[in-house]
Image (cartoon, helix red, strand yellow):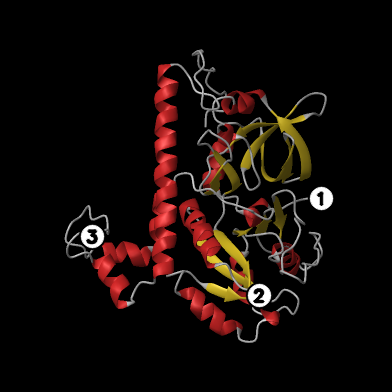
Amino acid sequence: MTIDLTALGWDAEWAAHVRRRADHRPGRVTRVDRGVCTVLCADGPIRASLGGAVLATAANDLSTLPCAGDWVLVGTWPDRRATVEAVLPRRTALVRRTAGKDASGQVLAANLTAAAVVEPVHPEPDIGRIERLLSLAHESGAQPLVVLTKVDLAADPDAIARQLAAVAPGVPVLPVSAERGAGLDPLRAQVAAGRTLALLGPSGAGKSSLVNALAGAVVMPTQAIRRVDGKGRHTTTWRSLVPVPGAGAVLDTPGVRAVGLLDGSRGLDRAFVDIAELATGCRYGDCGHDGEPACAVREALENGELTARRWESWRRLQRELAFETRRRETRVAAERRGGWRGGRRRPSRPASPPSAGGF
């Protein structure tokens, strides 16, 4: 079995890293199971454990561990055991804040060309969730999209798409039905050869059905949603990169119950570009939009140009980012004084030796 890596996005820039490590072969991670990666190489898929250089780097920064979508270099030992010896630099990455006291990030997927926020129209779209996930998608560096699924259950899906365009300025809103195969052509363009489309959304949104429709085969299991509230169970329990025959790839993610923003100020500004543009009209550059004179944002709220719901959504996410920034600064300051773990100080220790990966 041979695999066309260029269809998965391999190009001359990636190849330059291999020239520095000619004794290793490149591949793309499709999924990770307890530290063992499934990697698509030119001569077929392999299972590879983590090499010493990768583990040494991850000891100081868990976000450097390989994830679905990563390009890696694989070494083969005399006993035919394969190991991931280096993770190539990521061009884009979906990162969310992890739960717990430490303000750390979890890389959900890497090297995406487009990131689609998938939201079902039934029982009704959750606008706040769309805004939050769009901030994450914008921050990733990939092209953001909004995909409205199960539109066969809506009386006027185009009207819903037009309404949601107001909360996704500048972002394509695509109504689709995987069940009927309707509206899929714009999505197929996102998985053309060399491109990777990530699907991000709640359980029961129809992400796995979209993967199957784009791949032209049942490659991901699906489950029926509950009729009472339209919610579904977690069908996908791992992040998985799925090659599309004759095209690129689509990356499915588990249903996300909650997404914490880690450091998404740029993504938030892009997701709420309407508010950011209004703020440029304020008299004062540091306007807090809370009673200052000649505040363009407050004026827009008063005349109805900006809705109270969208304003409150922006303020809530801004407060969350400010809180995470303070936590991160506190952690960094504590580490400089002697370490930080779970909100408690720890004795300092020598830094791990530099990774042999050299990336």
Q: Earlier in the sequence, mark 3 or mark 1?
A: 1
Alpha carbon of mark 2 to alpha carbon of mark 3: how far? 47 Å
Foreground of the two, 33 or 335? 335
Query: Neighbour class for label 1 at 10 Å: few (<14), some, many (≥20)?
Result: few
Q: Earlier in the sequence, mark 2 or mark 3?
A: 2
208 on left or right of 117: right
Q: Which residue is mark 3?
A: 291
Hey, what amino acid is under mark 2? Leu
Q: Which residue is mark 2?
A: 184
| Residue drawn at point x = 42 percent, y = 47 percent | 321
Hey, what amino acid is under mark 3? Gly
Foreground of the two, 223 or 190? 223
Q: Earlier in the sequence, mark 1 or mark 2?
A: 1
| Residue drawn at point x = 75 percent, y = 55 percent | 234
227 on left or right of 151: right
- Picture disc at residue 165: none
- Picture disc at residue 1: 1
Hey, what amino acid is under mark 1? Met
Of discs 1 and 2, which sits in the foreground?
A: 2
Query: Neighbour class for label 2 at 10 Å: few (<14), some, many (≥20)?
Result: some
- Do callouts 3 and 1 mark residues in contact (Cβ within 8 Å)? no
Q: How far across and how far down the image is residue 18, in percent?
A: 59, 37
Foreground of the two, 105 or 290? 290
Q: Determine the secondary structure under disc 3.
A: loop
Of discs 2 and 3, which sits in the foreground?
A: 3
Alpha carbon of mark 1 to alpha carbon of mark 2: how far? 29 Å
| Residue drawn at point x = 24 percent, y = 62 percent | 280
Alpha carbon of mark 3 to alpha carbon of mark 1: how far? 66 Å
Above/below status of 157 relative to 144: below
